[in-house]
């Protein structure tokens, strides 16, 4: 596992992630500009109504206390009490209606937000450069779509609303306490301060380990995905025990982080509940002492201190402590949700593949000896080159490729290619040979502009490739990779992937050209046979034949064959070679091959060593020179 993990700001302190909260809120507001305010209003109504019973309890007790002091009967005060109850029932009906509406809105907004986020993440992923996928663990990226999205779901649907409800309820209850009695409010505040202190100490440790747990989950998923993809290799080399040991180590790390996180989280609840219970007793004792001492009431109301203050205060204290506890319980979910949101935003903030090209590939036809751009498909192409003076020139698409003094490094300071210069005229076949790591595949990556060169020039039909739009450049280049990738769909769909506008007849013709038609027609449903799991039901050679057919249907003037026959047996190679010879006819072709027998008929053979060209020429010339190529060819071994 040499790939680095994606940058993860989730490990930063909560304070450093405030920007994530703001961005999340702005995102929700942009997705649901009308629905979000309505949901917030419903939350506020629910929270305020949750604090209202304390006021009504005080009113009812005050009425009963007054009736007892004045010797009035139940009937004399029942009317006033029932009016309070009727108003309270009305409040509860309002709360029920707003709660129902809020739950429905939150369900829509939560799932809708996750759907839109997944779309945005996938859309962004399509714009990222190849370098991102070469340097990031694929399983960890997948974890962003699964685990991080799930923690964000919990944050949006549960944690954030619960925090808001608890926060509003606490503020409302605090205002009621100050209104009734400042003395009693001070007692409650002292107890709540202790709860905040415990929450900060215990909850802070829990949050730290929950963030680490989230990152450990990504590492575990990345390793599991890597092992599944390499299962055959593991079995071939009897590497099961080593793989199990490595996974156990990663799993053990995940266990330790999760254990610590949940250990803190599990002790926080009981501690806060017991502090709440102790606070309830303290408030009862303080209220009794104040009653006995006949201390004058201090508050915003003119209500004298008495039973009508103490009894509701006990209920308020229970609610107050309960809501503080609710806030504390949500800290872990909030931190995990913010960690997930941070990783999601990191993916969305990855730099897109830069493309400053302005030369495009267009359909043309020849009129009076001049190239004229046209909308209909003519199978005649040209580079449309706009100039600063407003003029436009059209250069025929020929497949003339030149590399001029090219230097390149994947990592700054570690040059991979040194002063590479070569050319390929239209219709020429250029082969690259050399040991692994010599720079063969790197050159083809630069032709496609998967990476940009550090110095020098690459020209296609005389145009600097930096000036050509990447999508148009890649349309003019066909590539067959050593590692085949087939997608879920029919055989026909996979061939058509090379050219989405291709007809069935064109796809079949491309398959025949590549030598794939024979085995395709023997499949259960021929070209309509479904392919799943990267063509697991096909042999490696058959998958490679489909990959070659896919390139053939694109019909580009330049073809890159990156060890395209390395996974094919000798008999199949002979079939493929015939098709490839037909495919290469009239095209500029770059061939990378370990089997020197496959490059003998190349017009030019480039011998690379540590990123430098050490020999060039055709087969006969290089054999006559008796240099490196001669040693490789006569040594009767294939390049390793």
Image (cartoon, rainbow, N blue to C red):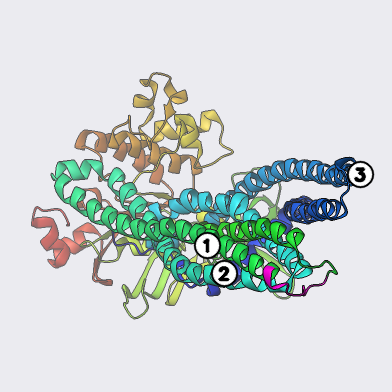
Left/right of residue 282 with respect to residue 6 in the rendered view? right
Q: Which label is found at residue 191?
A: 2
Mark 3 crowd level (few <14, some 14–19, many ≥20, 10 Å Cα): few
**Residue at image coords 54%, 74%:** 15
From this view, report whether residue 38 is shown above or below residue 211: above
Please identify, in this view, whether the residue under mark 1 or under mark 3 is nearer the observer. 3
Residue 359, image quadrant: bottom right
Residue 181 visible? The answer is yes
Residue 558 visible? The answer is no
What secondary structure is found at the residue carrying circle 3?
A: helix
**Front-most of residues 446 and 13:** 13
Residue at the extreme bottom of the image, as rendered: 413
**Front-most of residues 327 and 311:** 311
What secondary structure is found at the residue carrying circle 2?
A: helix
From this view, report whether residue 506 is shown above or below residue 425: above
Q: Which label is found at residue 76?
A: 3
Residue 483, position as x, y percentages in the image: 33, 47
Residue 198, position as x, y percentages in the image: 48, 69
What secondary structure is found at the residue carrying circle 1?
A: helix
Mark 1 crowd level (few <14, some 14–19, many ≥20, 10 Å Cα): few
Q: Is residue 293 magenta?
A: yes
Residue 155, image quadrant: bottom right
User: What main secondary structure does the magenta stretch of the protein show?
Assistant: loop
Q: Earlier in the sequence, mark 1 or mark 2?
A: 2
Q: Which label is found at residue 527?
A: none
Separation (CA) of disc 2 from disc 3: 40 Å
Q: Which residue is mark 1?
A: 278
**Front-most of residues 326 and 533:** 326
Residue 227, position as x, y percentages in the image: 28, 47
**Residue at image coords 71%, 47%:** 375
Q: Are marks 1 and 2 in contact (CB under 8 Å)?
A: yes
Q: Earlier in the sequence, mark 2 or mark 3?
A: 3
């Amino acid at each position: 596992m040499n790939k680095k993990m994606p940058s993860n700001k989730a490990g930063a302190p909560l304070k450093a992630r405030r920007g994530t909260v703001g961005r999340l809120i702005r995102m929700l507001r942009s997705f649901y500009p009308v629905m979000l305010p309505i949901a917030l209003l419903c939350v506020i109504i629910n929270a305020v109504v949750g604090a209202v019973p304390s006021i009504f309890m005080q009113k009812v007790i005050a009425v009963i206390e007054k009736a007892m002091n004045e010797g009035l009967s139940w009937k004399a005060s029942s009317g006033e009490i029932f009016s309070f109850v009727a108003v309270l029932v009305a409040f509860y009906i309002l709360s029920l209606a707003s709660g129902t509406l809020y739950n429905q809105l939150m369900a829509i907004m939560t799932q809708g937000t996750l759907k839109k986020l997944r779309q945005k993440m996938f859309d962004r992923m399509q714009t990222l450069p190849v370098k991102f996928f070469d340097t990031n663990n694929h399983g960890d990226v997948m974890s962003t779509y699964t685990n991080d999205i799930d923690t964000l779901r919990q944050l949006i649907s549960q944690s954030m609303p619960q925090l808001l409800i608890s926060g509003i309820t606490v503020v409302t209850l605090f205002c009621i306490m100050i209104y009734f009695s400042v003395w009693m409010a001070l007692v409650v505040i002292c107890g709540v301060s202790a709860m905040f202190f415990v929450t900060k100490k215990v909850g802070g440790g829990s949050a730290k380990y929950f963030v680490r747990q989230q990152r450990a989950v990504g590492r575990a998923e990345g390793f599991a995905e890597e092992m599944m993809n390499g299962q055959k290799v593991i079995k071939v080399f009897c590497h099961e025990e080593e793989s199990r040991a490595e996974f156990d180590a990663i799993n053990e790390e995940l266990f330790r982080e999760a254990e610590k996180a949940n250990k803190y989280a599990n002790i926080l609840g009981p501690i806060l509940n017991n502090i709440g219970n102790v606070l309830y007793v303290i408030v009862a004792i303080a209220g009794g002492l104040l009653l006995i001492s006949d201390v004058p009431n201090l508050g915003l109301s003119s209500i004298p201190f008495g039973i009508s203050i103490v009894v509701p205060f006990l209920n308020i204290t229970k609610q107050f402590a309960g809501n503080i506890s609710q806030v504390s319980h949500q800290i872990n979910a909030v931190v995990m949700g913010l960690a997930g949101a941070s990783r999601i935003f990191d993916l969305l903030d990855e730099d897109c593949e830069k493309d400053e090209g302005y030369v495009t590939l267009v359909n043309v036809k020849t009129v009076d000896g001049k190239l004229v751009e046209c909308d209909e498909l003519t199978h005649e192409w040209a580079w449309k080159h706009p100039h600063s003076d407003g003029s436009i020139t059209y250069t025929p698409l020929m497949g003339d490729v030149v590399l001029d003094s090219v230097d390149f490094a994947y990592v700054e300071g570690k040059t991979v290619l040194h002063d590479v210069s070569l050319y390929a005229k239209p219709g020429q076949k250029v082969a690259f040979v050399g040991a692994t790591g010599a720079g063969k595949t790197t050159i083809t990556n630069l032709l496609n502009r998967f990476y940009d060169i550090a110095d020098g020039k690459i020209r296609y039909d005389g145009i600097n490739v930096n000036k050509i739009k990447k999508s148009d450049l890649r349309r003019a280049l066909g590539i067959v990779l050593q590692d085949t990738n087939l997608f879920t769909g029919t055989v026909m769909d996979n061939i058509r992937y090379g050219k989405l506008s291709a007809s069935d007849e064109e796809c079949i013709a491309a398959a025949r050209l590549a030598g794939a038609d024979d085995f395709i027609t023997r499949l259960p449903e021929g070209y309509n046979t479904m392919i799943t799991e990267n063509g697991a039901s096909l042999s490696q050679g058959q998958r490679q034949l489909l990959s070659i057919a896919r390139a053939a249907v694109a019909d580009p003037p330049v073809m890159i064959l990156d060890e395209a026959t390395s996974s094919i047996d000798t008999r199949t190679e002979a079939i493929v070679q015939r098709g490839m010879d037909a495919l290469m006819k009239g095209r500029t072709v770059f061939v990378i091959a370990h089997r020197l027998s496959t490059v003998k008929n190349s017009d030019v053979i480039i011998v690379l060593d540590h990123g430098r060209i050490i020999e060039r020429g055709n087969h006969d010339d290089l054999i006559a020179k008796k240099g490196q190529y001669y040693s490789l060819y006569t040594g009767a071994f294939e390049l390793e």
